[in-house]
Amino acid sequence: MDSLSLIVADVLEMDPLSSAWFIFCNRGKDKIKILFWDTNGFWLYYRRLEKGRFKWPKPTASGHIYISTQQLNLLLSGLKLENPQAHQPLYGREV
């Protein structure tokens, strides 16, 4: 956890104590670690696929991307983030 929080601070130049979830993937794209700060300590989620690979998105020039909760669920389910069959959310609509 300490080394991941240092990567967040030094490489990504972001605050590891923020409310953001930081998601890391290994080179083989079969393991994911999710790091986030919760009140007085870090949580670390770890997922290893026995078969297959995560559909990891391409990072921006800065080396990181922002994804929504829905996109995280797609990623963890083994789906691409750009799911053409999903409906896009509507914001600011009234009935």
Image (cartoon, rainbow, N blue to C red):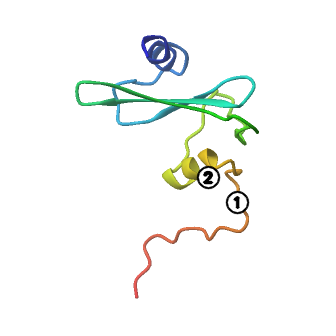
Look at the picture and state if 74 lies above or below 27: below
**Label 2 sits on what residue type?**
Leu
- For the point 48% across and 20% down, the residue is 8
Q: Specify the farthest residue to the front.
A: 50
How many numbered tags mark residues here?
A: 2
Q: Residue at x 73, y 64 (%)?
A: 84
Q: What residue is shown with label 2? A: 74
**In-image side of 67 versus 45 (left or right):** right
**x, y percent for residue 80:** 71, 50
- Looking at the image, do the residues carrying marks 2 and 1 touch, with CB atoms under 8 Å apart? yes
Work out whether 93 lies above or below 32.
below
Quarter of the image for residue 27 reads top right
Q: Which residue is mark 1?
A: 83
Element at label 1:
loop
User: In the depicted view, which residue is nearer to us: 45 or 65?
Assistant: 45
- Outermost bottom residue: 95
